[in-house]
Amino acid sequence: MPTSPTTRARDREILRLAVPAFLALVSEPLFLLADASIVGHLGTVPLAALGIAGAVVQTAVGLCVFLAYGTTASVARRIGAGDVAGAVGQGLDGIWLAVLIGIPTTVVGALLAGPLVRLLGPAPDVAGPATDYLRLAMLGVTPLLVVLAATGILRGLQDTRTPLVVAVAGNLANIGLNLLLVYGLDLGLVGSAVGSDLAQAGTAAALLVVVLRSARRYGVSRRPHPDGIGRAAQAGVALVVRTLTLRASLLVTTYAAARLGSTSVATHQLAMTLWTFLAFALDAIAIAAQALTGRALGAGALDETRAVTRRMTGWGLVAGVVTGLLLAAASPVLGSLFTDDPQVRDALLPVLLVAAVFQPVAGVVFVLDGVLIGAGDGRYLARGGLVVLAVFAPLALAAPHLAAPGHRGTGLVWLWGAFGTGFIGARALVLLHRARGSAWLVAGDPAGLADRGRPDAA
C-alpha cells in the first residue's frame, strides 16, 4: 500500500537516527572482542583477570546508562520547544552529574578493588592480576560516564552520527594503544588497562569539544548549575531502578541455568550472547524513539507523538520479525561457530528457536521502552520493571524442575520459554498498557523547568 509523504518523512527521520545508532551499538562489542583477543594471547590468567575486572567496571557504568537515556529525553524536549540554548544547558547539567558520580565511584572502586574482585570468587592466581587491572581501569569510569552523558546530548539534538564517528575512532585508538603498550612496550595486562583509560579519556574529550562548541555558539554557560544537576539526578533514580530490575531478571535467568549443569550454563551463555547482539538492532530504533518522542512532546504535538509511536512500533515489529527469521534460519549452524562440544551444539538449537519466536515481541518492547523513556515516564518504567521481575522470577526458578528425567537440556528450553513469556511478554503487556493510555503524553516540560538558556558569563 502506498505511503503518504508524511509517513515517508517519518521513516526517513527514524532511519537517520537509528542506522548510526545501530552501527555505534554494534561497534562496541566487536572492539571489546579485539581487546579480549589482545589480552588472550598473554595467557588464560590475564584473560580471566580481564573478565573479572571488566565485569565490575561494566556493572558500575551500566547502572549509569540513565545519563544517556535521561539526557536524550530532556534535551530532545527542549529542542521540540525551540529552545536550543536550554537544550544544551540541560545537557551540560548531565555532564556535570556524570563527573560528580564518576569521581567518587573511581575513588571507592580503586580503594575497594580487592574486595570487589573477591566477591566474584576468582581463583587466587587470577585475583591478584584482576585487582591490579581494576585499580587502573577505574580511572576510566569518569570518562565513560561523560561519554554517556555527551552521547545523550547529541542524540537529544537529533545527531546520532557524531557519536558513531567518535566511538569508532576511540575504539580504533584503543586497539592501537593496547597493541603498543601490551606488546610494544611489554607492559602486559597493565598496558591494556592504561591503553583503555587513555582511549576512553580521548573519546570523552572529543565529545566534550563538540558539546562545548554548541554551548559557545548559543551562549550557554559551562559552569555547574546545582538545580539542573539535582533535577537530572532525581530523574535518573527511576531509570536506575528500571535498569536494576532488568539486570536482576537476567541474573535470575543465569542462576536458573546454572542449576541445570555446566552444559546448560555454556549453552545459555551462547544463546544470551546471540540474543544480546540481535537486541542492538532493536535498541537502535529505541534510541530513535527516545529522541523523536522527546522532541514531539516538547513541541506540544501530541497527535504527532501518537503517529510517530505507531510508526516506530511498526518498525520494531518488522525488525523483530526479520531478526527472528534470521536467528531461526541460522540456528542449525551457529553452534558450530562457537563451540566444538556436541552436547552444547545440540542443546543450543531448540533454545535459539524459542528465542527466535519471541523476537517480534522484543521488537515492540524495545521501541515502547524507548518511547516512554523519551517521554520522561521513568517512574512508570521503574514500577513496571518491578512487576515484570515479580512475574518472571518464579517462572525462571521453576523451569529447571520441568526438565525431563535424563534430559536436562529440556529444562533450558523451558527456561527460555519462561524468559520469552514471563520477561519479554510481561514487559510487552506492561508497556502496551501504558502506551494505550494518555498519562505519559505530557506536552512541553513536565518538570516545570525555568528558562535554561543561561547566557555565558564566563
Image (tube, grey):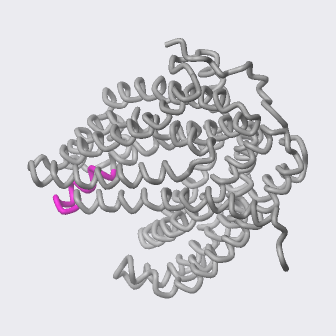
Which residue is at a point 85% across and 39% down the rendered structure image? 300
The image quadrant of residue 38 is: bottom left
- Residue situated in front as seen by the camera: 83 or 41: 83
Numbered disc total: 0
- Residue situated in front as seen by the camera: 135 or 187: 187
* Above or below, comparing residue 66 to residue 317 in the picture: above
Residue 281 on image: x %, y %: 58, 65
Q: Residue furthest front?
A: 217
Which residue is at a point 49% across and 49% down the rendered structure image? 162
Q: Name the quadrant of the N terminus.
A: bottom right
* Above or below, comparing residue 53 to residue 101 in the picture: below
* Above or below, comparing residue 10 to residue 229 in the picture: below
Residue 397 is at least partly visible in this image: no
Residue 115 on image: x %, y %: 33, 34
Residue 374 on image: x %, y %: 71, 44
Q: In this view, does 339 lie to the left or right of 450?
A: left
Q: In this view, does 297 lie to the left or right of 128?
A: right
Residue 446 is at least partly visible in this image: yes
Q: Is residue 127 left or right of residue 149?
A: left
- Residue situated in front as seen by the camera: 31 or 54: 31
Which residue is at a point 47% across and 37% down the rendered structure image? 210
Q: Is the magenta stretch mostly helix, strand or loop?
A: helix
Residue 411 on image: x %, y %: 58, 73
Which residue is at a point 61% across and 80% down the rendered structure image? 353
Is residue 184 on the magenta stretch?
A: no
- Residue situated in front as seen by the camera: 26 or 3: 3
Q: What's the magenta region? A: 40-51
